[in-house]
Image (cartoon, helix red, strand yellow):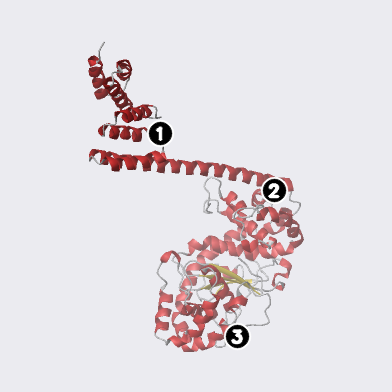
């Protein structure tokens, strides 16, 4: 996410494409570049510098000393971070009292937002030893006003904690981290410029500086725009490739922000879609009143989707990433996707993405956007229907599991002769399913054991009326009904029960034999 500190840096967004000329990147307050030059390095191609920055180191050291200890996935903190904390643990607690108090009073955000705010603060400071805040800069990014005052504690902390010496010792590790990122950034920039159809050797009116932050948590990528310098701060990583999409997202901001500013009148017209965007279920709050940024984010996500259809993850397998983006309020994504397909199919050399962008933003047909929204609504309805079916399936599976468990418990109690306990269990079963055949069958057996034949016969009759009954239970209940009727002299009714058993198919051998035997005992 970008925060504009000055607007003049964009020159209202014009990308100046000229023949290549060497333009040195901004020096990071006396810190040298990593020194190792790769063949055909991006530093020679697109105004990119790789720097270590003592301001980032000192601010993040103070932040860690204040209690910022977040790490993703409960992983161990990095070696550099662990070494810093070991050094700090040797110091008196009074060294950190004011820092911790200041941090605790402003610790209101998620770890990512916290890192972003303190990164912004670091980039707005002069270098050591004073770390003075550059008051002439206006429009400070979000969060700076809340944490102002933290910088006034850095000068003493820098001296008391011996950070000048520690920085000299560990700076080579920061440089090695940059070497890991060089080939990834090189390839990412080439891929992006190729898609834009911009020559590799170009001159922008702005620079990019890649800065490692080994005191942050793993694999974080933060971007900040300060005057005409675009900073990308990367956290420690074992594999920079994991951060490829994050880096490309920020580099696309570097390329597109000026173009969006250049076409600001066209972008303002797209505000007519803002209300429809806000109605989407996952619309981010930080874009609520920033339609220009919403358009930029939509365009960036669409380009990434075009470049990486396989690697770009989707939160919903059925709907795909396009649907996910619409649900995040990027309702122009399907339209941009169609336009970018046209751009890709137009192979004329003169057609670059910067000059094609105006046609993407101009005269967007409202009926197309309305159709996209209807498609998204239909997809949402289908997803909700499938989700309801799935939840019902899960509910029924759980119900069956619960019923089976109660039946097994009741059977165990009956086998042990604990009839009252079995009755209690069956009552629970019948609360879940009043016409459960096995439960009624067990109750009939319990009543028979207690000598309540009339109730047993009634329960057996309810049993044979139950849906989905096993044949052996059906046959056994008929036999028991016949037995009780015969005992009461209801021979005709008993005969009907026994004959019904003999007419049955299936594995009911014992019941068939018993019915045949009892039928022979009935008076003619």
Left or right? Give the position of 154 relative to 338. Answer: left
Q: Quadrant of the N terminus?
A: bottom right
Q: Residues within 10 Å of mark 3 (few under 14, many from 20)?
A: some
Inter-mark Cα distance, 1 to 3: 79 Å
Relative vertical location of residue 338 with respect to residue 486 in this rendering, above or below: below
- Image-quadrant location for residue 89: bottom left
Q: Position of residue 364 (x, y in %)?
A: 73, 51
Whichever of labels 3 and 2 marks the residue nearer the N terminus, that label is 3
- Residue 56 in sight here: no
Task: Residue under label 1, please give it.
Answer: 435
Which residue lies at the image location 52% right of the left edge and 43% below the top edge? 388
Inter-mark Cα distance, 1 to 2: 53 Å
Q: Position of residue 339 (x, y in %)?
A: 68, 50
Q: Residues within 10 Å of mark 1 (few under 14, many from 20)?
A: some
Q: Are marks 1 and 3 in contact (CB under 8 Å)?
A: no
Inter-mark Cα distance, 3 to 2: 50 Å
Whichever of labels 1 and 3 marks the residue nearer the N terminus, that label is 3
Whichever of labels 1 and 2 marks the residue nearer the N terminus, that label is 2
Q: Position of residue 206 (x, y in %)?
A: 66, 71
Number of numbered callouts drawn: 3
Which residue lies at the image location 49% right of the left edge and 81% below the top edge? 100
Task: Residue under label 3, please give it.
Answer: 132
Return the residue nearer the eye: 1 or 299.
1
Callout in the foreground (1, 3): 1
Relative vertical location of residue 488 with respect to residue 141 in this rendering, above or below: above
SS at badge 3: loop
Callout in the foreground (1, 2): 1
Return the residue nearer the eye: 422 or 259.
422
Task: Residue under label 2, please give it.
Answer: 369
């Amino acid at each position: 996410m970008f925060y504009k500190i000055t607007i003049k840096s964009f020159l209202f967004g014009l990308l100046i494409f000229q023949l290549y000329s060497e333009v040195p990147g901004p020096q990071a307050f006396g810190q040298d570049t990593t020194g190792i030059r790769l063949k055909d390095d991006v530093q020679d191609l697109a105004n990119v510098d790789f720097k270590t920055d003592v301001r980032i180191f000192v601010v993040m050291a103070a932040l860690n000393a204040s209690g910022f200890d977040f790490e993703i996935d409960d992983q161990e903190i990095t070696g550099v971070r662990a070494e810093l904390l070991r050094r700090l643990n040797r110091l008196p607690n009074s060294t950190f009292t004011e820092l911790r108090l200041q941090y605790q009073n402003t610790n209101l955000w998620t770890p990512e937002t916290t890192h972003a705010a303190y990164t912004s603060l670091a980039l707005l400071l002069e270098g050591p030893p004073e770390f003075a805040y550059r008051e002439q800069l206006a429009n400070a990014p979000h969060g700076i006003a809340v944490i102002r005052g933290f910088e006034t504690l850095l000068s003493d902390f820098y001296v008391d904690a011996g950070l000048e010496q520690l920085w000299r010792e560990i700076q080579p590790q920061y440089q090695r981290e940059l070497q890991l990122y060089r080939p990834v950034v090189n390839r990412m920039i080439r891929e992006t410029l190729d898609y834009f159809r911009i020559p590799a050797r170009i001159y922008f009116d702005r620079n990019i500086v890649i800065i490692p932050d080994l005191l942050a948590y793993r694999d974080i990528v933060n971007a900040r725009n300060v005057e005409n310098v675009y900073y990308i701060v990367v956290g420690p990583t074992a594999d920079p490739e994991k951060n490829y999409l994050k880096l490309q997202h920020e580099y696309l901001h570097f390329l597109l922000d000026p173009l969006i500013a250049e076409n600001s009148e066209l972008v303002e017209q797209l505000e007519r879609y803002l209300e429809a965007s806000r109605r989407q279920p996952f619309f981010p709050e930080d874009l609520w009143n920033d339609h220009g940024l919403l358009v930029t984010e939509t365009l960036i996500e669409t380009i990434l989707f075009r470049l990486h259809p396989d690697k770009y993850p989707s939160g919903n397998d059925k709907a795909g990433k396009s649907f996910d983006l619409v649900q995040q309020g990027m309702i122009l994504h399907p339209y941009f996707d169609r336009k970018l397909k046209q751009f890709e199919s137009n192979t004329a050399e003169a057609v670059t993405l910067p000059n094609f962008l105006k046609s993407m933003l101009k005269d967007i047909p409202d009926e197309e956007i309305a159709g996209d929204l209807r498609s998204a609504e239909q997809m949402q309805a289908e997803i909700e229907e499938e989700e309801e079916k799935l939840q019902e399936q899960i509910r029924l599976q759980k119900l069956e599991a619960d019923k089976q468990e109660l039946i097994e418990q009741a059977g165990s109690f009956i086998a042990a002769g604990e009839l009252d306990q079995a009755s209690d269990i069956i009552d629970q079963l019948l609360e879940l399913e009043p016409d459960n055949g096995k439960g009624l069958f067990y109750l009939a057996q319990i009543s028979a054991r207690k000598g309540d034949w009339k109730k047993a016969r009634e329960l057996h009759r309810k049993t044979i009326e139950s849906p989905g009954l096993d044949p052996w239970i059906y046959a056994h209940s008929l036999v028991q009904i016949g037995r009780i009727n015969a005992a009461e002299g209801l021979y005709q009714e008993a005969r009907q029960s026994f004959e019904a058993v003999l007419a049955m198919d299936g594995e009911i051998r014992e019941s068939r034999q018993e019915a045949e035997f009892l039928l022979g005992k009935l008076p003619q």
